[in-house]
Image (tube, rainbow, N blue to C red):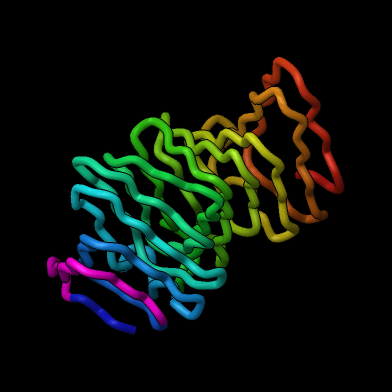
Amino acid sequence: SITIATGDTLIVPGTFTHTDGAINGGTIRVDGNATIGAAADASSSVAGATMLSFTAAGDQTITGAAGGDSAGLSVNKPSGTVTLSGTVGFSGNVTWTAGTLAAGTSTLVLRNGGGTGSPGLTIDVPTSLTLNNLEINLSNNRTVTIASGDTLIVPGTFTHTDGYLDGGTIEVRGPMSIAATADGTTANPSAATVLSFVTTNDQTITGAAGGYTAGLSVNKAAGTLTLSGTVG
């Protein structure tokens, strides 16, 4: 792994490429594009994950490959768009303060590095953020916590593979899949993430025995919600 000293920032005006290995500590300010390879490794811990910071004006692209995970993500752009391309994985906290997201056909995967238990990953967005596909896949009893009042909008597929889900709302506009390893929520029912189904299209929630997700809210003016398999 590579460790950047606490408080230090590497500034990359060109392209930042994370091909292999874990990156811990400090900040990498990406002023150009970023590429995450399939062999890129999750940070050694969530708290110690390097923050990839996007603060430049202008358009930028993060391109990922399935299986690869970089560190944390912070976006605070005065102007311009961040485009996600491919399967983009992060293993640290995600903070989106300002800047437009173009999700296209991408999949955002949140996955953890080493360690067990709290604190897990936190997601903080400006009220709402529209993705495409989203996968939650935190092993070792880790938790994704969405900031109170925040909503992640998922027009594509939402997949809860592993880990706990606390706080906020995920508005599921397409199909949803709950794997046998999904852990539900660590919070009391009032603080569990709400999975919200409000669109008028037909949707399916597919579950596997042993898997549990968080809370469920259905308020569809039209369309059918179909349950398939064992849905927990």
Residue at the far top in the pictured view = 221
Q: Residue at x 38, y 30 (%)?
A: 127
* Picture quarter with the N terminus: bottom left
Given residues 181 and 89, the one toward you in this image is: 89
Q: Position of residue 2 (x, y in %)?
A: 29, 82
Q: In the image, which residues are magenta?
A: 5-19
Left or right? Give the position of 33 relative to 186. Answer: left
Instruction: Look at the picture and state if 39 lies above or below 218.
Output: below
Q: Residue at x 27, y 70 (%)?
A: 15
Instruction: Look at the picture and state if 148 lies above or below 119.
Output: above
Task: Tell me which corner region of the image, top left, top right, bottom left or bottom right, holds residue 216.
Answer: top right
Q: Residue at x 46, y 69 (%)?
A: 69
Q: Position of residue 32 (x, y in %)?
A: 25, 62
Residue at the far right in the pictured view = 229
Task: Tell me which corner region of the image, top left, top right, bottom left or bottom right, holds residue 14.
Answer: bottom left
Q: Residue at x 47, y 34 (%)?
A: 151
